[in-house]
Image: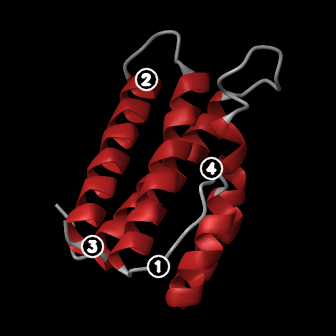
Amino acid sequence: MSDAARASKWLDFARDDLWVAQRLFHEFHPKQVYISCYHCQQAVEKALKAFLVNNDADFPFTHDCAKLCRLCKDLDGDFDNFLEDCGEVTPYATQSRYPNNAEIEEWENESALKIAERIVSVCEEKNGAAQ
């Protein structure tokens, strides 16, 4: 499978996570902020990995979106604009999946959704796969 095809698969998964995150926040009452934030983090992680794959770059097995974003920034300086956002969503990889962790407020979920939407969109554009 070519790098472009592999990157496309990563983007498909990122879009799926983003779609689920949006539905969990907007269509469920009460809003499912914990699992929605988890899917936001997953969407960002997979979109960044799609960009790295499309650029034939190796990346570590990690859920740290800021670390992945720094690798993307090494290839394309535009990703410098997303370092803080990636740091914001990274904790949702675990924080939102287990009880007794910090509370997540609706406004935090709204922020995570905006971040995920923006980063998935940018990675789609940079990979030439915007749909």
Q: Specify the amino acid type for callout 4.
A: His
Q: Is residue 126 left or right of residue 103?
A: left
The residue most toward the front is 1
Sequence order check, earlier mark of 4 and 3: 3
Q: Residue at x 70, y 52 (%)?
A: 88
Q: Residue 57 — which label?
A: 1
Is any part of residue 85 visible from this angle? no
Q: Quadrant of residue 102?
A: top right
Residue situated in front as seen by the camera: 50 or 96 = 50
Whole-percent x, y for residue 81 in the image: 60, 77
Q: Are marks 2 and 3 in contact (CB under 8 Å)?
A: no
Q: Around disc 1, counting alpha carbons within 10 Å, would you say few (fewer than 14), some (14 to 19), or many (20 or more)?
A: some
Q: Quadrant of residue 35?
A: top right
Q: Are marks 2 and 4 in contact (CB under 8 Å)?
A: no
Sequence order check, earlier mark of 2 and 3: 3
Q: In the structure shown, which secondary structural element does the residue marked by tag 2 occupy?
A: helix
Sequence order check, earlier mark of 2 and 1: 2
In front: label 4 or label 3? 3
Q: Specify the amino acid type for callout 3.
A: Asp
94 lies above or below 73: above
Q: Residue 63 — which label?
A: 4
Residue situated in front as seen by the camera: 28 or 78 = 78
Q: Residue at x 72, y 43 (%)?
A: 91
* Residue linked to disc 2: 24
Q: Around disc 2, counting alpha carbons within 10 Å, would you say few (fewer than 14), some (14 to 19), or many (20 or more)?
A: many
Sequence order check, earlier mark of 4 and 1: 1
Q: Residue 3 — which label?
A: 3
Query: How far is disc 2 from disc 3 in space, using C-alphas?
Result: 32 Å
